[in-house]
Image (tube, rainbow, N blue to C red):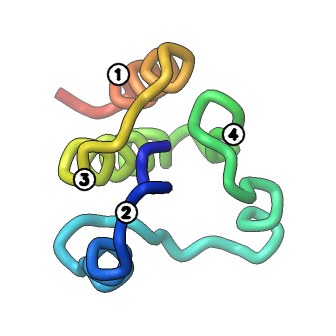
Amino acid sequence: SGAAAWDAAKRKAFANDLTRPQLLAVSAASNRSKGDQSPDLWQPSDKSSWCQYGRAWTTVKSHYGLTVTDAERAMLTTMIDTCAA
């Protein structure tokens, strides 16, 4: 959502970014179930992972200026609301 117009250099920077959490180690089954779905369409089944997942997603979206749909924003808010204060 927003990266389609990126040039090769920006794609390479994104793929090699070790500062912002883009990838999380998960089981093969979990990875297959998620595919390329956004948080409004797929959430980790373990709700204790929602905080980490929501923060990772929003950090990357913010840093790279990617778009967020209203439905995606609503679910990310729900996920981040699970974080301890």
Front disc: 4 or 1: 4
Please identify, in this view, whether the residue under mark 2 or under mark 1 is nearer the observer: 2
Judged from the image, the secondary structure of the residue bearing numbered disc 4 is loop
Question: Which amino acid, mark 3?
Answer: Tyr
Residue 55: give x, y in percent of width and height.
31, 44
Q: Amino acid at mark 2?
A: Trp
- Residue in the picture at 34% in, 52% down: 56
Secondary structure under tag 3 reads loop
Judging by the rendered image, the residue that carries numbered circle 4 is: 42
Query: Does 34 sit left or right of 1 as displayed?
Result: right
According to the image, label 1 marks what residue? 81
Between the C-alphas of marks 2 and 1, the distance is 31 Å
Q: Which badge, 4 or 3, is on the more N-terminal residue?
A: 4
Which disc is residue 64 wearing? 3
Residue for badge 2: 6
Earlier residue among tags 2 and 3: 2
- Counting residues from the N terminus, which is met first, the one under dot 4 or under dot 1? 4
User: Residue 46 in the image: x percent, y percent?
Assistant: 62, 46
Task: State the image quarter where residue 2 is shown.
Answer: top left
Instruction: Judge depth for marks 4 and 2 and give the one in front.
Output: 2
Dot 3 crowding, Cα within 10 Å, few <14, some 14–19, many 20+: few
Closer to the camera, 76 or 27? 76
- Say few, some or many: other residues with alpha carbon within 10 Å of mark 4 (under 14 / 14 to 19 / 20 or more): some
* Mark nearer the N terminus (4 vs 2): 2
Real-space CA distance between mark 1 and mark 3, rounded to the nearest whole angstrom = 23 Å
Inter-mark Cα distance, 4 to 2: 25 Å
Mark 2 in CB contact with mark 3 (< 8 angstroms)? no
Q: Position of residue 3 (x, y in %)?
A: 43, 55
- Mark sitting earlier along the chain (1/3): 3
